[in-house]
Amino acid sequence: MKRLLVLATAVTALFANAQGYPGAKPISFVVPFAAGGPTDRVARDLAEAMRKTMPGGNFVVENTAGAGGTIAATKVAKANPDGHTLLLWHIGMAATAGLYRNLQYKPLEDFEYLGMVNDVPMTLIGKPQLPANTYRDFENYIRANSGKLNLAHAGLGSASHLCGLMWQSAINAKEPMKEAMTTIPYGGTGPAMIALIGGQVDLMCDQTTSTTAQIESGRVRAFAVTTADRLSSHKLLKDYPSLKEMGLKGFNLTIWHGLYAPKGTPAPVLKQLNDALKLALKDPEFIKKQEGLGAIVVTDKRMEPAGHKAFVAAEIAKLKPLIEAAGKFAD
Ligand code: ASP
């Protein structure tokens, strides 16, 4: 009888383990861009924080670049909804909805929203050889060299693409440019940054999570931030004006990152992931790292699935007309 009981307990334990989540299988954060860029940075920092808040969770980062992030999003939308394949994406989730006609997924229907991670300003930066020290010099140089300069970005609908379009549209509204810039797409702003540092491209707009270290070391030149106000509490970035301050009316762009699972992921798994995410967002080490890179960790209702989804729905509606207005600069 005793032996039977021991056997029954062992079988129950084995069953619970087989059914258990996360189990031994890794949990992939699919990042829609190349390694070494800002989205990759956020995913790696979050993976590290969530390893602490979900004991046994083997979080790994998988880079699936291409088509402005939509290849990765398609992959996750169609993945097995078992909580082992998640998407870590930024504003592109909303921007591509207004840009691509044939998306293979529906942004608001084919994902479970797990919660948002952070808000991240962007910076307008140039190659180190650019003959400009201030934003004014920079804009004058751009105007004087209209049609000759290259702007790097991470693909159609990426944050850098969106920012580049909006900025060109804004300077054009102030005073028409003779010609639009040539845009050069990369698999992510990680490789684009290498090209910028090497002087193969002239300028780029990218998240502070990637640009801060490069600005600090002098490998690139920074001219402005994309938020409406200066980042007055950041030790390095506080010195750069906002584009709005530089006369680009109403310019205000902030990138955000969120976490998604394929539709149909079981509710207990979603809850476990959201609980672990919320704990990670309160981890002082994670917060400090993000703030050092100019990002602000989310503390409001966007940490919850419903708040996250409502925010993305509002962003889709907000970005559509902006993208259409700026769209004439698209290649
Ligand atoms: N910063 C990127 C963007 O422009 C992508 C990346 O994280 O590599 O969307």
Image (spheres, rainbow, N blue to C red):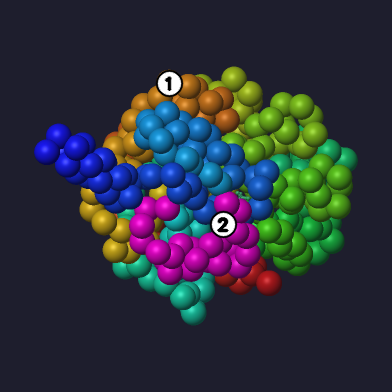
| Residue 194 spot, x, y in % from top left | 79, 45
Residue 300, compared with residue 79, is above or below; it is above
Question: Label 2's element?
Answer: loop
Amino acid marked by disc 2: Pro
User: Left or right: where does residue 197 sit relative to residue 96?
Assistant: right
Q: Can residue 91 be seen at all in this image of the molecule? A: no
Count every numbered label the image shows and give the total. Answer: 2
Give yes or no for residue 68 being in the magenta stretch: yes
Q: Quadrant of the C terminus?
A: bottom right
User: Left or right: where does residue 206 sit relative to residue 315?
Assistant: right
Residue lying at the far left in this picture: please name it. 1
For image coordinates 40% across by 64% down, the residue present is: 80
Q: Dot 1 surroundings within 10 Å: few (below 14), some, or many (20 or more)?
A: few
Amino acid marked by disc 1: Pro
Give yes or no for residue 56 being in the magenta stretch: no
Dot 2 beta carbon under 8 Å from ligand 1:
yes
Residue lying at the far bottom in this picture: please name it. 102
Q: Which mark is residue 284?
A: 1
User: Left or right: where does residue 234 sit relative to residue 150?
Assistant: left
> Which region is colored magenta?
62-84
Question: Label 1's element?
Answer: helix
For image coordinates 76% across by 27% down, the residue present is: 217
Q: Which mark is residue 32?
A: 2
Dot 1 beta carbon under 8 Å from ligand 1:
no
Residue 162, compared with residue 11, is above or below; it is below
**Image marks 1 and 2: residues in contact by CB distance under 8 Å:** no
User: Left or right: where does residue 323 sit relative to residue 146?
Assistant: left
Q: Quadrant of the N terminus?
A: top left
